Image (cartoon, rainbow, N blue to C red):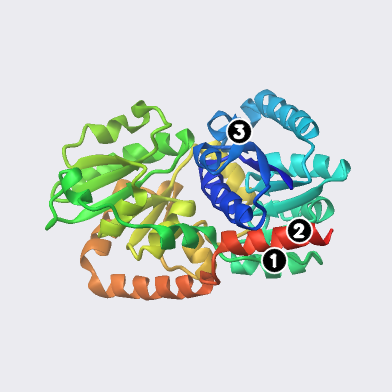
Amino acid sequence: MRYYIVAGERSGDLHGSNLVKAIRKRDSQAIFQGFGGDLMEVSGVKLSVHYRDMAFMGFISLATSLFKIFKYIKFCKNDILEFKPDAIILIDYGGFNLKIAQFAKAQGLKVLYYIPPKVWAWYQSRAWKLKACVDKMFVILPFEKDFFKKYDFAVDYVGNPVLDAIKEFQATPGFIQKHGLDPNGKIVALLPGSRKIELNKIVPLMAQIADSNKDVQFVVAAVKTLPAALYKALKEKTNVKFVEEETYDLLSMAHAAIVTSGTATLETGIFKVPQVVVYKTNYLEYSIANFLVQVEFISLVNLIAGKEVIREMIQAKASPELVDAELKRLLHDTDYVSGMKHEYENVYKTLDTGSASENTAQLITEYLQSK
């Protein structure tokens, strides 16, 4: 089979690479081409575009980058026609991939969506568009299956790929020594996100927290593809160190974490690290999002649990004073932390349905063979 695969972000690259490897176990002659990153390329995907060139986030960023986005959409469509795939596999990246799904469906191609856009969070009418142009959809959050039932769209819940990645993780020996950390001191992981618009607001906040906790070792999970200047406020602190491509090693050692909303909140929860979620953006971005978002929480831990397990400090609430107070509670209130870890266990059990990559690969190959 010939597969054209589209992943436009760092997390999609990880999950796409695992899915490609799982499909190859069942289809040794599989050929892959498309949009992705280094991990997908290593797994055998011929990259037409690297996701780093498509890092758009936020309503304003999208609005100011429309010409570039439409250029990549046009390129993707032409690339698909030249490649002549048997099926299209789309991974997350909703706005872009919905356009590609509509195009591919019109061309008579089988459209498979793994990790669909979070239409349950905002602009829920997009569920009808997904139903119209997607042949098979594989969701990774338990409540998504019931959500799509309301649209008479039968989707497959395959488990969560974050859990797959963490299960495969093996700690690097000597991590503490390698980074000059005190094994007897408290370590707080700082996960400021992977996009410039996030770091511009979150890094200065994290720097203020580091100033207020001189006796704590802070370690930043940095993204090597981002400009070092974005981390400048934290690089100036003597109690802050940096790691790259070692987030899971860091979480396996951390006593607490300050995390920007996203997949990282779930990863931190699965590692059972007490955390506080912080998110800040400019006023206009926040106003638009606040108007559109239709869910109570922004972190995956709370969404899956259906209640507040971890504190979410958004916009004005993401002040140095409030975040600092919550961090001190995470480091010193044992009863509070024990309750949080118990809820983490429940989230883990909810997600643990086998390998999402293997489950999805099996469903994809069975579906395509039946057709």
- Left or right: residue 5 compared with residue 178: right
Q: Is residue 117 above or below residue 106?
A: below
Which three-letter amino acid code belongs to the residue tagged 3?
Leu
Pointer 2 and pointer 1: residues touching (CB < 8 Å)?
yes
Q: Is residue 168 visible?
A: yes
Q: What is the number of callouts on the image?
A: 3
Instruction: Identify which residue, 52 or 219, lies in the foreground.
Output: 52
- Left or right: residue 200 compared with residue 68: left
Q: Is residue 357 above or below residue 38?
A: below
Q: Earlier in the sequence, mark 2 or mark 1?
A: 2
Which three-letter amino acid code belongs to the residue tagged 1?
Asp
| Label 2 element class | strand
Q: Position of residue 292 (x, y in %)?
A: 65, 50
Which three-letter amino acid code belongs to the residue tagged 2?
Lys
Residue holding disc 3: 47
Answer with the quarter of the image where residue 178 lies. Answer: top left
**Crowd tier of the residue under label 2, counting other residues whose Cα lies within 10 Å: few below 14, some 14–19, many 20 or above:** many
Q: Which mark is residue 156?
A: 1
**Crowd tier of the residue under label 3, counting other residues whose Cα lies within 10 Å: few below 14, some 14–19, many 20 or above:** some
